[in-house]
Image (cartoon, rainbow, N blue to C red):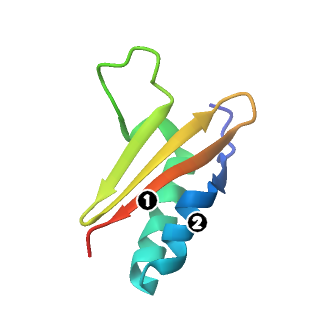
Amino acid sequence: MSGQPYAVRVSAPAAKVLDTLPEHAVDTVWDILAAAASDPYGFGQFDADDEEGEDVRYAAVGQLSVTYWINRPLHRLTVLNIVWLG
């Protein structure tokens, strides 16, 4: 890793979910993404049985989960899905 945090992009479906969350949940999403941008492989692989899916990661904190894809060539993360069980 280059030391620079990864840029974060939010997909359109994830942005729709983000717009509906309460403020404290939105803050938690951004905290999760800040941690992921600093260490993208610090969270678990979404499907550990998928040998080719190492760049799709799943971060869960309490009732909130974020699924993101690590785009190594562009040095950015793309948020694929956000789930809030609140």
Q: Is residue 72 left or right of residue 61?
A: right
Q: Position of residue 79 (x, y in %)?
A: 55, 51
Q: Which of the two labelled residues, at mark 2 and mark 1, occupies the earlier sequence position?
A: 2
What residue does disc 2 label? 15
Q: What's the residue type where badge 1 is placed?
A: Ile
Q: Nearer the viewer, residue 15 or 1?
A: 15
Secondary element at tag 2: helix
Q: What's the residue type where badge 2 is placed?
A: Ala
Crowdedness near tag 1: few (<14), some (14–19) or many (≥20) residues, C-alpha within 10 Å: many
Q: CA distance from mark 2 to mark 1?
A: 9 Å
Tell me whether the residue at label 2 lies in contact with that at label 1, contact meaning CB atoms closer than 8 angstroms.
no
In the rendered view of the protein, which quadrant contains the C terminus? bottom left
- The correct choice, above or below, for 53 with respect to 9 in the image is above
Q: Position of residue 26 (x, y in %)?
A: 47, 75
Determine the image quadrant of residue 45.
Answer: top left
What residue does disc 1 label? 82
Q: Is residue 4 left or right of residue 43?
A: right
Secondary element at tag 1: strand
Name the residue rendered at 46%, 85% in the picture.
23
The residue at the far top in this view is 51
Name the residue rendered at 65%, 45% in the picture.
6
Count of labels shown? Answer: 2
In the rendered view of the protein, which quadrant contains the N terminus? top right
Q: Position of residue 64 (x, y in %)?
A: 32, 64
Q: Position of residue 35 (x, y in %)?
A: 48, 54
